[in-house]
Amino acid sequence: MPVWTSGSKRSRSWVRTIPITDDDIKAIGKDPKTALKFPPKYGFGDNAYVVHLDISHQLHCLNTLRFIAWGQFDEAAKQPYSDLHWHHVAHCTEVLRENMMCSADLDVVTSNWKETQDVPFADFNLNKKCTDAEMLIQPQDMREVPMEDEITGSMGFTRWTWNMDMRMTTLLEVPPEHIIKISAE
């Protein structure tokens, strides 16, 4: 399926949410009191926390940038975009930059002359040794919580209607530099 293809199957492929327990939360060094739990309607009981692998977040961010590049192919895109949308784009750009810097690819790219080019052209045909992402994602797919009814918005955002009693027991303080004032447009 080409990257610019739209549709619910493509959008769903960017959102993969799975449940884990409070022991799992503690094992990754997080506090269950501050972690988001699944709403009761999913039937996991009181010990199921909403998580996703970071690769899913990275793919979500790539998808966000994909919508910017190929928005005209997305029938659900709402333009002009809001301030919140552009903050989200900036966030996703930074997430992808951080991940690239963290796992800096040190493959060497040569350049060569092409008959149709007036300048040397980079040869991106590299011999890569890649992580088998599908092998990592497949077990997650088996635990994935189908949330098609929860997905709204053109960028694959997962939105739930949260009741106040479903909020985490400990609210985290937001640093002032992370507070975004969004105008009602």
Image: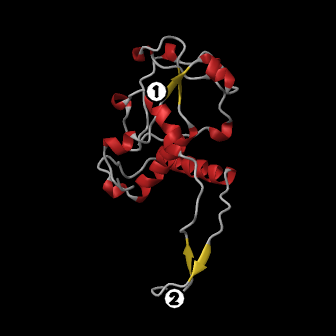
Please tell me whether residue 51 is drawn above or below residue 183 in the rendered image. above
- Against 147, residue 42 (above or below) is above
* Residue at image mark 1: 143
Res 144 seen here? no
Q: Residues within 10 Å of mark 1 (few under 14, many from 20)?
A: few
* Residue nearest the observer in this picture, 37 or 17: 17
Residue 133: image location, x then y, percent = 52, 44
Which residue is at the front of the view, 179 or 120? 120
Q: Nearer the viewer, residue 72 or 116?
A: 116
- Label 1: state its secondary structure: helix
Q: Which mark is residue 135?
A: none
> Residue shown at 62%/22% (left/top)?
24
Q: Are marks 1 and 2 in contact (CB under 8 Å)?
A: no
**Residue linked to disc 2:** 118
Describe the element under mark 2 as helix, strand or loop: loop
How packed is label 2: few (under 14 Cα within 10 Å), some, or many (20 or more)?
few
Judge depth for marks 1 and 2 and give the one in front: 1
Whole-percent x, y for residue 130 in the image: 58, 52
The residue at the far top in this view is 45
| Earlier residue among tags 1 and 2 | 2
Please report the residue visible at 64 percent of the width from the left and 17 percent of the height from the top: 23
> Quick one: quadrant of the C terminus?
top left
What whole-number distance in Å separates the C-alpha atoms at marks 1 and 2? Answer: 52 Å
Residue 61 x %, y %: 51, 47
- Give the residue at x 48% y 11%: 45
Whether residue 76 appears in this view of the structure is yes
